Amino acid sequence: MVSGSAKYREIKQALADAGAFDADFETREIIREYTGRALPLTGDISADEERRIDEAVRRRKTGEPLQYIFGKWEFYGLPFYVGEGVLIPRPETELLVDIASERLNARSTALDLFSGSGCIPVSIAKTTGARCFAVELHDAAFGYLKRNIALNGVEDRVTAVQADACDGTLLGDMRFDYISANPPYITEAEMRELPPNVRYEPETALSGGRDGLDFYRAFIPAWAGRLANGGTIAAETGETQGAAVSDIMRECGLEPTIIKDYAGLDRVVLGK
């Protein structure tokens, strides 16, 4: 057995040498995941704990995301299964749920496009009680979407729909109080410069074409006419894309507002 403090130093150095952006954070997460204890650790780490920790560190050093290694990640205080083929939930995307929580209640109907893991519609349903529809095209991501609906016990409030999110004819003549979307928005140039851990995530959830705007040009016109009276489209964007997405919304008869994320960067365009 090895002492917890010694293992902490060993892991942190190994991850730092491998180029981890925040080796201290990742070390703490790995220790907590495989020992069930938070730092500072007292006493020793068992041989079985050390074996699982070492395997996680080995995988992380290859560039595999920590979230895929664990197989689960937290978003909006809720657990979500993640793995190969699905986008990893990110803190800035929680802003879409914050916006929904200010506007929706149990009588509301929401639609989430490009749902991936389902972190947005599941969190909206848990937070507001709204009836949500989640649209995801790709098989691997759709599998995670269904698992996460069940994991969080919202089968009665979230309906998974496997379809093209840019098809505005889906779901008949239903209208929605809130339409959220976190589409692929990375530009061709940015795709070539992605760090190794992001390259593990599916290109279908990342690449937005030459200027990153391909999906906005498709889904906003398709769905703008499906808003209920007073309804809103909330689209996550890259930090330099707010003005361009606002123009697309104006062309579709929506009144756009750019909302900044917790770091002060343009992150969501809200179209009323």
Image: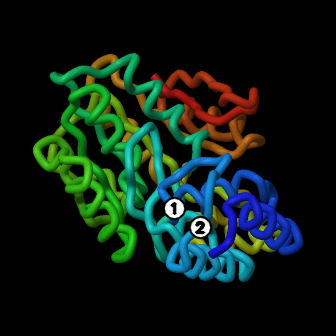
What's the amino acid at mark 2? Ile
Residue 51 vs 152, above or below: the answer is below
In the image, taking residue 12 as reference, residue 130 lies left or right, namely left
The residue that mark 2 highlights is 45
In the image, taking residue 61 as reference, residue 218 lies left or right, namely left
Q: Is residue 213 visible?
A: no
The image shows residue 241 at horizontal and vertical percentages of 71, 42
The residue that mark 1 highlights is 35
Residue 147 location, quadrant: bottom left
Residue 232 location, quadrant: top left
What's the amino acid at mark 1? Thr
Give the camera-side residue of 130 and 271.
130
Residue 58 vs 247, above or below: the answer is below
Secondary-structure class at tag 1: helix
Nearest-to-viewer mark from 1 and 2: 2
- Which image quadrant: the C terminus? top left
Report the residue at 35% width, 39% height from top.
123
The image shows residue 192 at horizontal and vertical percentages of 80, 73
Q: Are marks 1 and 2 in contact (CB under 8 Å)?
A: yes
Measured in 3D between alpha carbons, the distance from the residue under mark 1 to the one under mark 2, in whole angstroms, is: 8 Å
Report the residue at 60% width, 82% height from top.
55
